[in-house]
């Protein structure tokens, strides 16, 4: 029997205010004065001088502000890599991603593509990366995606939405500072937090579950329930949700996600729906696969007065639904985790149309 030998984040610091130690953390990794650190920063912080002034810039270091309004794309990765290469005669000392899942996924992908030839779309899949990326650091400013700990960087390419899944993908360093999540809008806080919750439900109910993954998944699930059902104080809630995101990401790193992610990838690829919202829209209709998980999700949704977007699929043609289904069916490990090795005998194009029908009817009603 062959056991999975998976990587972990090499170093992690946790604590309120730990972002202030960033300069101290990355300075030993600077190659020389000519090799800059490149900071990819969510553009929500562009006008926040009190925040950006804390970014430890030296020499020719650069801040590149990134819009997180859309899911990260392979074309965006390639453009950033080209810009970085053209701006310096040598490779940077490192890439530091400061933001949510979009920015952290871009940071991981850029790090990898600075040392691997071709386009990032060539590496969408499992274990296609040949060379270790440059030093890269993840600093989440919202909790739930698990990107800070995962071995994948999810990208939308010309023909599919699929991660660069590789042992070289995880960050070399992560800084977990709950204070950075203080001003996240409520809807975004809920949708991204539910990404973590859904990670747990899909992992714990999947065929790939094992004691290692289960330990992380159960811890993350308990933390999610405390945050979204018990309403602890803001500081405690921020701390717990950041830990839930980390543990939920670890759980799926050693198992896999399932039906909600497979279907939401198609929704995101076709319509550009943000990952957290897409997961919530899909998961809301998956009682047949995750009855207890969906029941609890609806309870959390009611408690926080969350109304999911409607009408997204109202004008889709049959051809467009086929595209969504093609994307979903291409994610074979997700279906194997959710259904089993014989998933193809149970999950057909027709069955996916039936699964999608509630959202279509909801959209046109």
Image: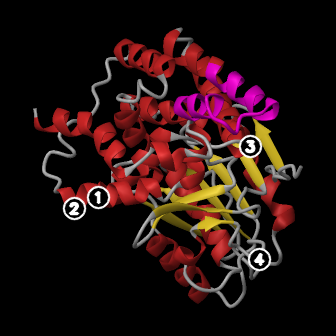
Q: What residue lies at 24% left-to-right and 38% top-to-bottom?
A: 357
Which circle's residue, 3 or 2, is located before the other in the chain? 3
Q: Is residue 99 visible?
A: yes
How packed mark 4 is, by other alpha carbons closer than 10 Å (few <14, some 14-19, many 20 or more), is: few
Q: Is residue 342 above or below residue 135?
A: above
Under circle 3, the secondary element is loop
Of tags 1 and 3, which is closer to the observer? 1
Point out residue 99 in the picture as x, y percentages from the top left corner.
54, 50
Q: Secondary structure at mark 1?
A: helix
**Badge 2: how crowded within 10 Å, few (<14), some, or many (20+)?**
few
> Which residue is depicted at the point 29% across and 39% down?
354
Q: Give the position of the C terminus as an image quadrant.
A: top left
Label 1: which residue? Answer: 322
Residue behind mark 3:
254
Location of residue 261 with respect to 244 vertically, above or below: below
Q: Are marks 1 and 3 in contact (CB under 8 Å)?
A: no
Marks 4 and 2 sit apart, C-alpha to C-alpha, by: 39 Å
Q: CA distance from mark 2 to mark 1?
A: 5 Å
Residue pointed to by mark 2: 319
Q: Which residues make up the magenta segment?
A: 197-221
Residue 346 part of the magenta-drawn span: no
In 3D space, how far apart are the residues under numbered discs 1 and 4 (Cα atoms)? 36 Å
Q: Which residue is mark 4?
A: 131
Report the mark closest to the observer, 4 or 2: 2
In this view, the residue in front, 250 or 227, is: 250
Q: In the image, 139: left or right of 122?
A: right
């Amino acid at each position: 029997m062959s056991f999975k030998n998976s990587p972990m984040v090499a170093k992690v610091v946790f604590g309120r205010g730990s972002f202030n130690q960033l300069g101290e953390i990355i300075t030993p990794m600077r190659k020389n004065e000519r090799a800059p650190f490149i900071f990819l920063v969510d553009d929500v912080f562009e006008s926040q001088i009190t925040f950006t002034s804390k970014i430890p810039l030296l020499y020719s270091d650069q801040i590149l502000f990134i819009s997180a309004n859309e899911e990260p794309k392979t074309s965006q990765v390639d453009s950033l890599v080209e810009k970085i290469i053209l701006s310096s005669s040598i490779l940077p000392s490192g890439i530091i991603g400061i933001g949510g899942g979009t920015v952290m996924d871009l940071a991981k992908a850029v790090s990898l593509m600075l040392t691997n030839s071709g386009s990032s779309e060539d590496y969408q899949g499992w274990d296609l990366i040949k060379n270790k990326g440059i030093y890269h650091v993840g600093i989440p400013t919202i909790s739930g995606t698990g990107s800070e700990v995962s071995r994948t960087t999810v990208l939308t390419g010309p023909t599919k939405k699929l991660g660069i899944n590789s042992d070289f993908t995880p960050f070399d360093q992560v800084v977990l500072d709950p204070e950075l999540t203080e001003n996240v809008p409520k809807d975004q806080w809920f949708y991204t937090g539910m990404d973590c919750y859904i990670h747990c439900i899909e992992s714990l109910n999947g065929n790939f579950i094992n004691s290692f993954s289960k330990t992380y998944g159960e811890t993350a699930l308990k933390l999610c329930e405390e945050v979204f059902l018990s309403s602890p104080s803001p500081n405690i809630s921020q701390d717990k949700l950041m830990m839930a995101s980390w543990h939920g990401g670890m759980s799926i790193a050693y198992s896999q996600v399932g039906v909600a992610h497979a279907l939401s990838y198609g929704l995101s690829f076709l319509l550009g729906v943000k990952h957290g919202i897409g997961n919530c829209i899909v998961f809301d209709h998956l009682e047949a696969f995750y009855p207890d998980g969906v029941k609890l999700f609806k309870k959390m949704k009611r408690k926080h007065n969350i109304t999911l977007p409607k009408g997204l699929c109202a004008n889709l043609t049959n051809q467009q639904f086929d595209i969504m289904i093609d994307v979903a069916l291409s994610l074979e490990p997700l279906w194997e985790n959710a259904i089993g090795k014989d998933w193809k005998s149970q999950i057909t194009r027709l069955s996916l149309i039936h699964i999608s029908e509630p959202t279509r009817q909801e959209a046109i009603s």
